[in-house]
Image (tube, grey):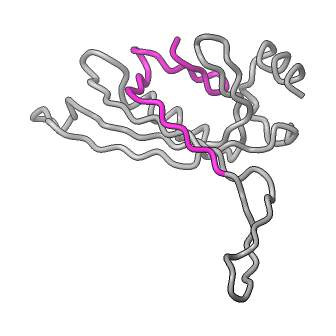
Amino acid sequence: MMMALGQFVFSLSTLAYQEFQRQTDWRHGSTSRIGVRPARQFLGPGDDSITLPGVLLPELTGGIPSLDEVREMADTGRAWVLVEGTGRLYGLWVIESLSETRSLFFSDGTARRIEFSLVLKRVDDDRIDLLGTLVSTAANQLLEELL
């Protein structure tokens, strides 16, 4: 297991991402002043996003059913607990977007290669009301420890 988002497990047989890109922002308000630089005030954390790009080779690895499952999870609008295979807990995340590019087709139109990019955004960990229904009991216990 590389990572789990709710009950969806990222692995070679499902969606094996090839990069883990994370961007964390912090908010600073700005007030214009005459003759000097603007005054800045720290307002708190901003967006936290993770992008997971990868390539599926359906003959060897996961395929369309895995992408469909992620789309179904995103359709719920719910947040999911994100846990790395090492056990590191990242908190609650929503699926913001999923893009795919299919190429190298068989004669029946089936793609031999599918490139994908999944974008996740972090939500406040105290928003238990957003939790998806597929969260396991173990993930709930980890979340309670986090809070």
Looking at the image, the residue that sits furthest to the front is 35
Vertical placement of 67 versus 28: above or below?
above
Taking the image as shown, residue 39 lies to the left or right of residue 145, namely left
Front-lying residue, 28 or 22: 28
Q: Give the left or right position of residue 51, taking residue 35 as reference.
A: left
Q: How many marks?
A: 0
Image quadrant assignment for residue 12: top left
Front residue of 59/101: it is 101
- Give me the residue at 88% from left, 19% from top: 145
Q: Hey, which quadrant is residue 66 in on the image? A: top left
Residue at x-position 57% and y-position 39%: 72
Q: Quadrant of residue 123?
A: top right
Q: As drawn, is 19 to the left or to the right of 145? A: left
Q: Which residue lies at the image location 69% right of the left edge and 52% below the top edge?
A: 26
Residue 20: say if magenta.
Answer: yes
- Residue 71 in magenta stretch: no
Tell me the magenta residue range. 1-25
Q: Measuring from the top left, give residue 79's x and y in whole percent.
A: 72, 39
Furthest residue toward bottom: 34
Residue 30 position in % (x across, y down): 73, 73
Image quadrant holding the C terminus, namely top right
* Residue found at the far left of this picture: 107
| Position in image of residue 49 (x %, y %) | 59, 44
Q: With 112 as the anchor, is 17 left or right in this view? A: right
